Image: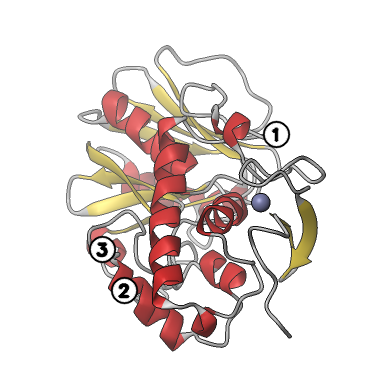
Amino acid sequence: MPELPEVETIARQLRRVVVGKRIADFTSLWHRVSEPMPASLFAARLAGHRIVGVGRRGKLVVLELDGAEALIVSLRMTGRLLFERDGGAADPYTRAVVRFDDGSLLRFADTRKFGRMAVVDLEELSGEGGGAKTPLHRSLGIEPLSRRFTTRRLAELLRRRSRAAIKPLLLDQRAIAGIGNIYAIEALWRARLHPLRTAGSLRPAEAARLHEAIRWVLRKGIRFGGASRRDYRDARGERGRMQREFTVYDRAGEPCPRCGRAIVRTVVGGRGTFHCPRCQRAPAS
Ligand SMILES: [Zn+2]
């Protein structure tokens, strides 16, 4: 499932190729891709608009349109957003196509059909903890790579949610936007924190380590073009390279790169989790 680094990679690639293009038409091949808006209405809302920027909010790709609107795309499990200069080859998993007036197109392919698109007012995306405006971005929390995400802000969050286990808290998009299972696992290993530690039990030095680790793993993920396990592909249809860099994710039984102890797999909050039992000491209870 694409997380912040994967979505950021796609957004950066698209920025280079679609900014300035005018949307000629939108075709839906899966009626739920634009729900609750009917595809015909969705197409009418997009047609004639120019793309003026491409960004990211949490795990959403944000295509900024003239008129202070945005086409936002949630890739969910298996969504791919592919830019094709010359119309491209047929793809049986195509769910929607945004065609530009120069003949190039943006294809939304999605094998499992969980991905969605929506058109929103741009300003709805800028705030944090905003209301439920569309089904795609209910109350997104702070951006972890933004300047506003300071150690102090993280410490405040840990205090406010003091009883929450740290790993599920990192995955809560209403708290911090963009972190998923892979980068939460890697950040906790780097910060030497057990996934079941409660947020309120972290000492200031540990909170500072976690803050550093979150930003470090996300930036590294972006640098390596995201992680491809099964489905993720960037906007050019290519795999990322971050999967080779995992320290503990999907490495049960392999030695911890820091201390050599075998990495173990557990389940926390319903999600498979990997940690080093020596570097990441379990809480006492
Ligand atoms: Zn270790």
* Residue at mark 2 to residue at mark 1: CA–CA distance: 34 Å
Q: CA distance from mark 3 to mark 1?
A: 32 Å
> How far apart are labels 2 and 3 at the CA level?
17 Å
Mark 2, secondary structure of its residue? helix
Q: Nearer the viewer, mark 2 or mark 1?
A: 2
The residue under the point 50% across, 84% down is: 200
Q: Which residue is mark 2?
A: 153
Q: Viewer-proximal residue, 229 or 113?
A: 229
Three-letter amino acid code at the position of disc 1: Arg
State the residue position of label 3.
126
Query: Do we see residue 47 in this rendering?
Result: yes
Q: Quadrant of residue 240?
A: top right
Identify the secondary structure beneath mark 1. loop
Viewer-closest of 14 and 12: 12
For the residues carrying marks 2 and 3, which lies nearer the camera in this image? Answer: 2
Q: Residues within 10 Å of mark 3 (few under 14, many from 20)?
A: few
Q: Residue 264 versus residue 243: which sits nearer the camera?
A: 264
Q: Earlier in the sequence, mark 2 or mark 1?
A: 2
Residue 253's spot in the image, x, y percent? 82, 44
Residue type, label 2? Arg
Residue 99, how many percent across, how many down? 39, 28
- Percent from the top left, x then y, of residue 193? 58, 65
Question: Of the numbered discs in the image, which one, if any, rests on residue 230?
Answer: 1
Query: Mark 1 Cα within 10 Å, few/some/many (few <14, many 20+)?
Result: few
Could you tell me which quadrant the C terminus lies in?
Answer: bottom right
